[in-house]
Image (cartoon, rainbow, N blue to C red):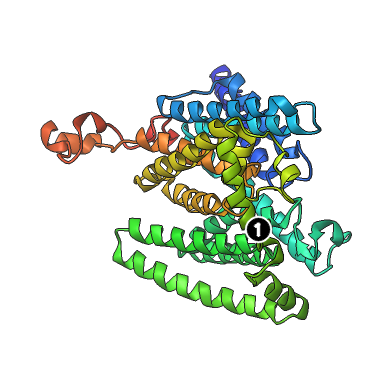
Amino acid sequence: MPAAAAVSSAYVISPARTVEKLRHLMLWLTGFSGAFVFTEPSPYEVFASAAIFVFFASGLALRRGHIPLFAILVTYCFGLTIAMIPVVTESKTALWVAVSWFLAATTLFFACVIAEDTERRLRVLMRGYMTAAIIASLIAILAYFRALPGADSFLLYGRAKATFNDPNVLGPFLVLPGLLAIRRALSFRLKDLVIGGAQVSVIAVAILLSFSRGAWGHFAGSAALFIGLLFVVSNDPRERARIVGATFAGLVALGLLILALLSMKGVGTLFSERASLDQSYDMGQLGRFGRHVLGFQLALDTPWGLGPFQFAKIFPEDPHNVYLNAFMTGGWTGGITYILFVVMTLWVGLKGALRATPWRPVLLAAWATFIAVAAEGAIIDTDHWRHYWLLAGLLWGGAVAASRYRVEITHKSVEKKPRAAAEPSLQRKERITIVRALSGLSPASR
């Protein structure tokens, strides 16, 4: 008996559990490192590479739903590589294409990772992302008001950029965490209401202080779309009423906060300047929009593209249009497949996000964010935004997982009803098995 007791009380080391903890740690670090982009390659590349190694070494499934994504990404990157060949000896061109290959690989990686153990892995990844977003937001706010040592290092032309190279990237990076904070506040539990409200307030102020018109519109549009989707997918009239009421109250509170900030002389002046649609660099034949027209005309005559950084040698600045840039840096092959990638991601992501799964709120937030980034790509180059490729991976992985999610027929209900009566008539018989992601069961259900 003593020997048996000693054996039963011994701590058992499970290799599988240890590996899964390591996987979760790497996911958290990858989500967290996305906010620290000072150079290329950035810390994100280091942690994402380590995460890819850990997952591939311990086993990572490529499912049938991933094949279209794989084919599109490889074709797009192949177009970039072909266009680079004539200018490969020029500075940074090879590095730019290598980073593009890597970011495309991260999309496939996240799609494969999120397709398994979806709910838990999404939670870990988003926690890391949220932590990074709050830290970056606080740095942006404190730096703007000169309450941080070395504040100028986190500003660009008086605009908050925090731990990014550009204020125009800081704002869009914060949108997904902002939507998740809104979702948390809408849970109507006091603790979540306070924490979620605080998170979205900090994030919204940081986005405002980035003074990025694209980010302002991005956050407003994504938030409206996300809340609208939550309202549509809810089947409870009381929950819908709470969503409407909480949204109205939140808008009033956020509006008062923004008005208080705008009353400050420096903030109000820069806001008025940035909010103007009549910016000198947008106007004229060689302004932003003039370059778009001339650039697409040039794309018709250059089927193999120009290669990275060549557009600015012909025109005063870079394209500032990710779709035009895809044609310039990847030729017709890169341009067409990039557009196909965006369209397919939106379609596949929406189908997956509308399915009733435990992770649907996160997918809805990711989709509302991605469609706004896709629209913002018409006025800025987004092809090397790390979080953009992360969003695409989340949508593809979540969609693959959602397609494998099934409705449970409990053992008790099967005993009470005949087998034929237990099968819903509105769905195909082969789609009815058990309620869970097939990637795993919780310990309590085993």
Furthest-right residue in this view: 150
Q: Quadrant of the C terminus?
A: top left
Residue kind at label 1, given as amino acid type: Gln
**Against 250, is 354 above or below?**
above
Q: What residue is disc 1 on? A: 285
Q: Nearer the viewer, residue 373 or 82?
A: 82
Q: Is residue 119 visible?
A: no
**Against 115, is 265 above or below?**
below
Q: Quadrant of residue 155?
A: bottom right
Q: Quadrant of residue 217?
A: bottom right
Q: Say which residue appears at 30% left-offset and 61% top-offset.
A: 236
Q: Say which residue appears at 42% left-offset and 47% top-offset.
A: 360
User: How many numbered marks appear?
Assistant: 1
Q: Say which residue appears at 57% left-offset and 27% top-offset.
A: 17
Give coordinates of residue 192: x percent, y percent. 53, 61
**Against 33, is 284 above or below?**
below
Give coordinates of residue 83: x percent, y percent. 65, 29
Give coordinates of residue 85: x percent, y percent. 70, 24
Q: Nearer the viewer, residue 39 or 363?
A: 39
Q: Is residue 417 left or right of residue 273?
A: left
Q: Is residue 294 visible?
A: yes
Secondary structure beneath label 1: loop
Give coordinates of residue 167: x percent, y percent. 72, 57
Q: Is residue 91 left or right of residue 408?
A: right
Label 1 environment density (alpha carbons within 10 Å; few <14, some 14–19, many ≥20): few
Q: Nearer the viewer, residue 42 or 250?
A: 42
